[in-house]
Image: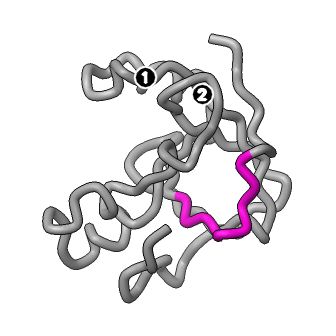
Amino acid sequence: MDPLPEGAPPEVVLVPNNDVFYRITLGNSLTNEDLISYLQKWPEKYQGEAKILASGVSVFDDLNAAKRKMKLPALRNHKGIAKLTLYPADGVVKKSFGKYHYTWWRTQSFDLSKAEMEAL
């Protein structure tokens, strides 16, 4: 996990406490590869505020919204959805990009084995 850029996470965030979110995964389990941010993938692509949001990963607070998002051509290689019950020790989230979408800045202590895979 790379260090976060200056200003990330932003000051106005939500601290989850037993809150459920969903993360689209490449396979049938949540792996570190599923939690690579856009900033880690394409560091030269993002500047300014976009860089801050790109340093987190997308999660959804609605399972059906995550399922709909999986149908997009850009996510055609993704095969699963992980259910994440997040607590303060797991990081912070910020509402972003639509009704159900959040950006999550996870902590290094987040335990991947806590994720439950949803039936699709």
Residue carrying label 1: 70
Q: Amino acid at mark 1?
A: Met
Are circles 2 and 1 on residues that touch, CB within 8 Å? yes
Where residue 105 appears, as percent x and y from the top left, is 55, 66
| Residue at the right extreme, as displayed | 18
**Horizontal and vertical percent for residue 53?**
37, 65
Q: Residue at x 32, y 55 (%)?
A: 38
Please tell me whether residue 94 is drawn above or below residue 11 in the rendered image.
Answer: above
Of helix, strand and loop, which one carries label 1?
helix
Q: Quadrant of residue 106?
A: bottom right
How far apart are labels 2 and 1 at the CA level? 9 Å
Identify residue for label 2: 81
Which residue is rendered at x = 65% and y = 70% of the image?
107
- In the rendered image, the vertical position of residue 85 relative to residue 68, given as above or below: below
**Image quadrant in which the C terminus is located:** top right
Per the rendered image, the range of residues in magenta is 104-112
Q: Residues within 10 Å of mark 1 (few under 14, many from 20)?
A: some
